[in-house]
Image (cartoon, grey):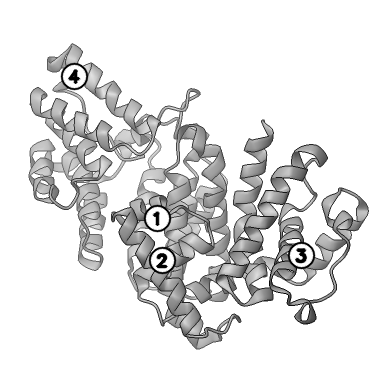
């Protein structure tokens, strides 16, 4: 693994904890971000020569804190810091510092940071966007894609959110129990989107974004410890675990996408599956259905099927119908159409998604599903056009390659394409 690969992976994984701790020190979002960036620049210079520190997060917090103190001249409000050489090398002194930092519960700073970003002074869309930017360091482009909006609109949303936080003089402390409950939905949504950003990565970016999935699961478990009787947090955690359990089988040796029905189920992580199934079963017993529980129940039906043909598509269709009632969305309807194609056939599924075209005109998966349905119906010319649009909308090379495979097959033998089934989303 090259220096840049492991350094970038370490910086990505450390960002939430480091930003959270720096924010606790300086009580200012911009200062915390700048301090972290300064620490990252120092890491890029020193880590290739010295090797990785024993605790990269501790190293980044101390170096970032030093840099921020120098720039804002707040020495009187900070604890004395050790000499730089003690946090820059790999001797035993650094290990002692890391233990001191662990002892101050710095890892829980992430949850504190999440609740600050999800302050009720902000509209929910701004809360989630700000948390994605501050906590996970996603680019504006990545966040805009998650929300299906333009980059400029998302940039304005984040800028307004930071300004409102500053103007509201938000206390940078862990909220009490009532405030945590009020902000829980926004925090859960942010964790879900962070997971999706890591889960949707493919090709060369997959190893770099993988820590986002692990971080989202860690945060979900942390939320579950705070809200042990909340069924939706059980559902969220179960959903992430069940989705992540399939990660080892989602790409082949060349990095190409392997769809759900073609995956080697022996590669699925059974430990994560067992934990996820136990959580969703526990959540359902509360009889308080919610969107995360329904999505987790859908994922559970997939992982419980020993073979693709054993999948209970009729029950999945019913669950998606329930999700449409609770959380109407063109993407939910698109996903339901895959199940409808299995139960009622491609014509019924195509009729369901055609009205979605105006709202999903920039969505890669819409054109992929539409092309597959048209392919199954033998409408080769229309399928070819849909696949061409999917390639143009692809977010990664792996997505484009997958669609191109279908397009090549269609061009070689349109008659054979008539029997090609609609595949489940990965």
Residue 20 visible in the displayed image: yes
Q: Say few, some or many: other residues with alpha carbon within 10 Å of mark 2 (under 14 / 14 to 19 / 20 or more).
A: many
Q: Residues within 10 Å of mark 3 (few under 14, many from 20)?
A: many
Q: Which residue in the structure is indicated by mark 2? A: 158
Q: Which residue is mark 1?
A: 143
Instruction: Give whichever of 340, 31 is nearer the camera.
Output: 31
**Left-right relation of 84 to 174:** right
The alpha-carbon separation of the residues under discs 1 and 4 comes to 34 Å
| Between marks 2 and 1 in the image, the one whose residue lies nearer the viewer | 2
Q: Which residue is mark 3?
A: 66
- Element type at marker 1? helix
Mark 1: few/some/many CA within 10 Å (<14, 14-19, 20+): many
Q: Which residue is mark 4?
A: 410
| Of labels 3 and 1, the one closer to you | 3
Pick whichever of labels 3 and 1 is earlier in the sequence: 3
Q: x, y percentage for residue 304? A: 40, 45
């Amino acid at each position: 693994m090259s220096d840049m690969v492991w350094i970038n992976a370490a910086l990505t994984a450390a960002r939430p904890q480091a930003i959270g701790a720096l924010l606790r020190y300086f009580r200012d979002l911009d200062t915390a971000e700048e301090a972290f960036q300064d620490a990252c620049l120092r890491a890029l210079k020193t880590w290739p020569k010295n090797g990785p520190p024993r605790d990269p997060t501790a190293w980044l917090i101390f170096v970032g804190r030093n840099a921020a103190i120098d720039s804002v001249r707040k020495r009187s409000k900070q604890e004395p810091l050790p000499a730089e050489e003690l946090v820059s090398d790999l001797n035993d002194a650094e290990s002692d510092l890391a233990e001191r930092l662990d002892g101050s519960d710095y890892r829980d700073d992430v949850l504190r940071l999440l609740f600050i970003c999800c302050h009720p002074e902000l509209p929910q869309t701004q809360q989630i966007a700000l948390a994605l930017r501050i906590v996970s360091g996603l680019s504006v482009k990545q966040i805009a894609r998650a929300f299906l909006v333009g980059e400029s609109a998302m940039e304005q949303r984040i800028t307004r959110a930071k300004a409102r936080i500053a103007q509201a003089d938000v206390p940078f402390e862990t909220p009490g129990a009532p405030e945590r409950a009020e902000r829980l939905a926004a925090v859960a949504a942010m964790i879900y989107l962070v997971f999706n950003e890591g889960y949707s990565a493919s090709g060369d970016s997959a190893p770099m974004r993988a820590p986002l999935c692990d971080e989202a699961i860690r945060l979900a478990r942390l939320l579950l410890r705070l809200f042990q009787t909340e069924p939706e947090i059980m559902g969220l955690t179960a959903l992430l675990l069940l989705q992540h359990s399939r990660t080892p089988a989602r790409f082949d040796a060349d990095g190409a996408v392997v769809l759900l029905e073609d995956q080697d189920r022996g590669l699925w992580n059974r430990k994560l599956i067992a934990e996820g199934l136990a959580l969703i079963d526990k959540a359902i017993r509360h009889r308080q259905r919610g969107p995360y529980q329904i999505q987790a129940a859908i994922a559970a039906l997939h992982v419980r099927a020993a073979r693709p043909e054993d999948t209970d598509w009729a029950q999945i269709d019913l669950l998606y119908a329930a999700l449409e009632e609770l959380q109407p969305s063109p993407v939910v309807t698109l996903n339901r159409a895959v199940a409808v194609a299995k139960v009622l056939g491609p014509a019924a599924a195509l009729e369901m998604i055609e009205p979605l075209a105006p709202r999903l005109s920039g969505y890669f998966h819409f054109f992929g599903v539409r092309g597959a349905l048209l392919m199954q119906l033998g409408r080769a010319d229309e399928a070819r056009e849909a696949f061409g649009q999917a390639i143009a909308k692809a977010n990664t090379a792996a997505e484009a390659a997958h669609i191109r495979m279908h397009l090549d097959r269609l061009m070689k033998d349109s008659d054979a394409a008539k029997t090609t089934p609609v595949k489940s989303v990965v």
